[in-house]
Amino acid sequence: MTDTFVAGGATSALNAPLRIAVIGVGARAAIARFAVESGDGLIVAGVDPDDRARARVQSELAPEAATFATHDELLASGVPVDAAFVTSPDHTHAEITIDLLEAGVAVYLEKPLATSPADADAVLEAAARFGTPLYVGHNMRYLGVVQLMRDIIDRGEIGEVKAIWCRHFVGNGGDYYFKDWHADRSQSTGLLLQKGAHDIDVIHWLANGTTTDVVAMGDLSVYGAIQDRRSNADRRMPDWFSLDAWPPLAQKELNPVIDVEDISMMLMRLDNGVLASYQQCHFTPDYWRNYTVIGTEGRLENFGDTGGGVVRVWNSRTTYAPEGDLVYSIAGDAEGHSDGDALAVGDFVRFVRSRTSTQTSPVAARNAVAAAAAATESLRDGATPRKVAPPSPNIVDYFTPNQRKPSGPDLGPATHKEN
Ligand SMILES: NC(=O)c1ccc[n+]([C@@H]2O[C@H](COP(=O)([O-])OP(=O)(O)OC[C@H]3O[C@@H](n4cnc5c(N)ncnc54)[C@H](O)[C@@H]3O)[C@@H](O)[C@H]2O)c1
């Protein structure tokens, strides 16, 4: 046992803050600050091809940090780096991450792992070949609502899971996904993958299975009609965000290229027989996710997906009973998922330091990409059924020790019981 670890070709004391690089200094780059705030990391470098983004490295992340236009320049610079947060657009994930892993830099890679199954597999193979820590930031697994649903299932309150339905009301979709690179399939593949990878991963996790078969329908049914377009490369989210942009056809300044769907619906068959559906709409007035999980002895459903919401459980036979038999309060950030982000970054830091198991799984991240990519093919090819290729057994073997069953939060007692 040694008290040092080696990453990025450099050696730093085990308990010293990790020397962190942020690759892609846009809206999501701030996640790296969780490692700084916990005392686990120092941001030593920022990488972005855009001058304005590079200027933000010092003003928003770390005044002393070095800046580079490309990750190649960073790796050639001699600046010692232990870990990197890859928060660049999706189509850049695979190349950047493979190069970092080869250089021995541990990577926190934002979801989705990649924009195609082939690229996702290439990243996993690189992590296994070079033995460098890879973590994929599926932060939804740390959200109170997801932890709560998983614990209810694990306690057997609804019996054996047979079906999961997720409806995703992406009310902020016009602002979040149709004003920049997300709207361009050459950079995101499509929103079933870009955004849906989160929920496909959650569905797999709640069902304890992996999708083998998909079929999907989708369309660009609203935003394609808006002709008011501009490149927003000079800005970033939330510069253009406004709840006043309503109804959706009143949106302005959309991305010049829009060739992704704004409504998508996919059906999944999992390897353990569970059937699932995921429906995503980017022009709803409200913004939240609604899951229902149906088992052999009941069903659960969430109302609200942040702190202040509830998960209701029905476990007795009835007709219409809106309150359910049991009600659990959702713990966590009432505004969003910063609590999940902090937990995810903490898990990453522990993993980098001592290779502890993590609650997220690179193989599961790959499986979410594979299912979403197959569904995207299906919806662009007349809703034809698609098989989802499994990962290679060697890759699964390499990553399996990293997976961990969560202990879950203390839920407290159910607050309501009828009958
Ligand atoms: N887990 C979550 O909840 C969550 C939330 C938001 C975004 N994300 C993910 O974070 C990533 C970034 O999203 P965003 O909203 O911050 O995008 P963004 O457009 O705001 O920022 C991306 C930045 O990367 C830069 N960039 C482009 N090519 C680059 C390259 N080759 N090397 C380095 N930098 C490059 C851009 O100039 C830009 O500054 C995406 O993969 C997205 O899916 C995850």
Image (tube, rainbow, N blue to C red):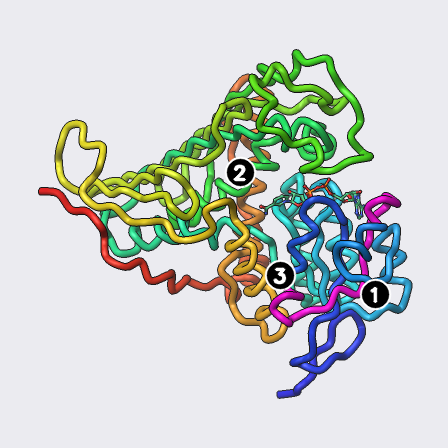
Q: Which residue was labeled with disc 1? A: 64
Which residue range is magenta in the image?
A: 35-54
Q: Residue at label 2?
A: 371
| Viewer-side residue, 56 vs 191 | 56
Q: Is residue 41 magenta?
A: yes
Report the amino acid beneath label 1. Glu
Which label lies toward us, 2 or 3?
Answer: 3
What is the quadrant of residue 97 in the picture? bottom right
- The quadrant of the image that shows the N terminus is bottom right
Q: Which residue is pictured at 53% across the width and 43% down the height? A: 198
Q: In what element is the residue under mark 2? A: helix
**Residue 276, numbered circle:** none
Mark 2 or 3, nearer chain start: 3
Report how far apart the C-alphas of labels 2 and 3 lie in the structure.
31 Å
Badge 1: few (under 14), some or many (20 or more) residues near its Cα, within 10 Å? Answer: few
Amino acid bearing label 2: Ala
Identify the residue under disc 3. Answer: 34
